[in-house]
Image: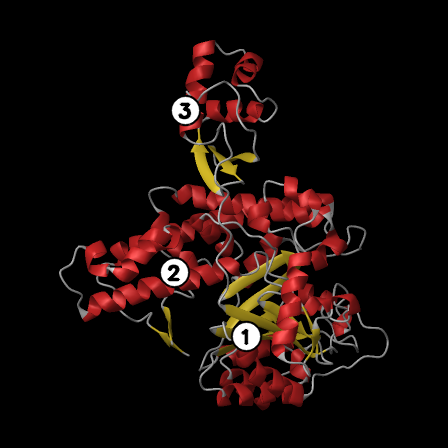
Amino acid sequence: MNIKNLGVIKLKEENKNKELIIKALVDPKFRQELKESPTKVLGLKSLTEINKNEIKFVFATVKSIESMINLMADTLLCA
Amino acid sequence: MQEGYSYIPRTLHIFKFHNKHYVFDSFTVRLVPIDKDETTFLKVCQNFENIMDVGGFLGWKAFQTFNMAENLFQKELLSTSHPQLAETNPSSEAVEIMINASQICNLNCSYCFVDKGRFHYGKKYVKKLSPYYAERLIKDLPKGIPWAREFSIHFYGGEPLLNLPAIRAALDAAEEMKNSHFTFSITTNGTILNKEVISLLRRGNFKVILSVDGPAFIHDSYRRTKKDKPTHAKVMKFLQKLRSDPKLTVQGSCVIRKGWSLHQAREYLSTIDVDTFKAQAVRLPSDHPLALSELERKNYITHLTEIADEVIECLRKGKTPRDNRFNSRVLQILKGTRRTSYCGAGKFIFGVAANGSIFPCALLAGRRDMELGNLDEPVSIWVERGKKWAEANSPRNECRKCWALPLCGGGCPVMYYACGERECELTRVNCELALAIFGIFYPDNLKDLLYLANPTMGKVYEI
């Protein structure tokens, strides 16, 4: 498994993507729909490369937020 | 109005932040903004089980009571049946291994809670992890924990930089494991500086958690070498080196103790070249000479509120706050899930002692009753034992009544015995402030909360 940072991708519609991230984070049904039929969810006829990358970014961000949620809530003092 | 006049009482936490009232439902992990009357009514509701009794107690007219109850039923803050319990936090796909690379330290800090790296061991114990064990651990992890997408290796101690051969062996092994993803971090006192140290830290692209308490007169009062020499100047030199190109990520870490406040510590941290701040009250029993006095604890809580305000300001400006203490909780509230344990100890966090013994957390090193195994055994064996340990160490009974349980997870089992209820009080304040931060952005500006996730945003795992 390799990790690749896509943070440099300029998101075309940043706010729209943020809304998608939040919806995918809090609504598992929506997340599934976005995965299975992204064109239907996004109201598009087909997906461009940019759209595909944006969707990838949404899923990756949701995953990393979920990892963050699991982090120790109060970091320990160091020795 | 729902059928009947009675309702199921449940744990609600009602609080005020900057003149706004909120109620947090621990059962559903949901924050709801409320007005003053709703606050009054809900507070009284906690003592009765019948709506009319609440109205009667408040001296309200029947129609007033009915309207209020109707409104609260609609908001799902009152119900005649149990609402659906919030889902648990999603399981982690990242595993953190805290390695006590060295269980000795070159400093002699009076507030050290790991006994200068001895942890729970007696007089005779292994001081340094062997390079063989370091290499073996890295090579065995991906096979033993196949579900993990990332292994976060955190060198801890003692002073881990006293054992460069083990760190080097771990890096060598990780570089060979091309199909696995390893990240490295280190908690260090920043007093050991040489070419090899810097070269290893750069090679592993380490995140460095650097202990620096404050300016020289503060730092040097307790962070001194065994020969009683001050260390602040050395730490500053170390920091400078870390921040020269290519820059490493550094978190400045301050210990707040008697005579040194959270406010002062953060002011100081903002003057040095670090990416993020960590400043926390010293975790010592209340009778320890360095423990905060009652007044200092009160001030500490006030300063936590100041930090919450700064976080809100940052998020409004579209910036990631440098103090990240609230991040994971606010995001958890956004997701609406509950924490079932304080941390991932035994599940996705493990500690490795210098002798190769495995514990649910590095802080438990030397606790024979908590030992999960050792590095000579297959990883899957101690991972399985860890799972059982985590299940057996569920929140204490007294936690079950606490409104903060879904956000706290029951407190750190290691620290509770040292700090007790005093630690719980601070955790509750942190939980309430995380709720308050969320409340400011709810419901219209939730997207601003994503700046809390900025450091990890954009990471894409490719299988």
Q: How is the image coloured?
A: secondary structure
Q: Amino acid at mark 2?
A: Val
Residue carrying label 1: B145
Residue carrying label 3: B71
Where is residue B174 shown, x and y percent of the image? 52, 85
Among the two numbered marks 1 and 3 on one chain, the one whose residue lies closer to the N terminus = 3
Chain ID at mark 2: A
Place residue B172 in its image quadrant: bottom right
Where is residue B65 shown, x and y percent of the image? 47, 15
Where's the C terminus of chain A, which quadrant?
bottom right
Chain ID at mark 1: B
Task: Tell me the residue at 28%/58% (across/down).
Answer: A34
Contact, mark 1 vs mark 3 (Cβ under 8 Å): no
Q: Mark 2: few, some, or many residues within 10 Å (few <14, many ≥20)?
A: many
Above or below B74: residue B431: below
Residue A62 shows which numbered tag? 2
Q: Nearer the viewer, mark 1 or mark 3?
A: 1
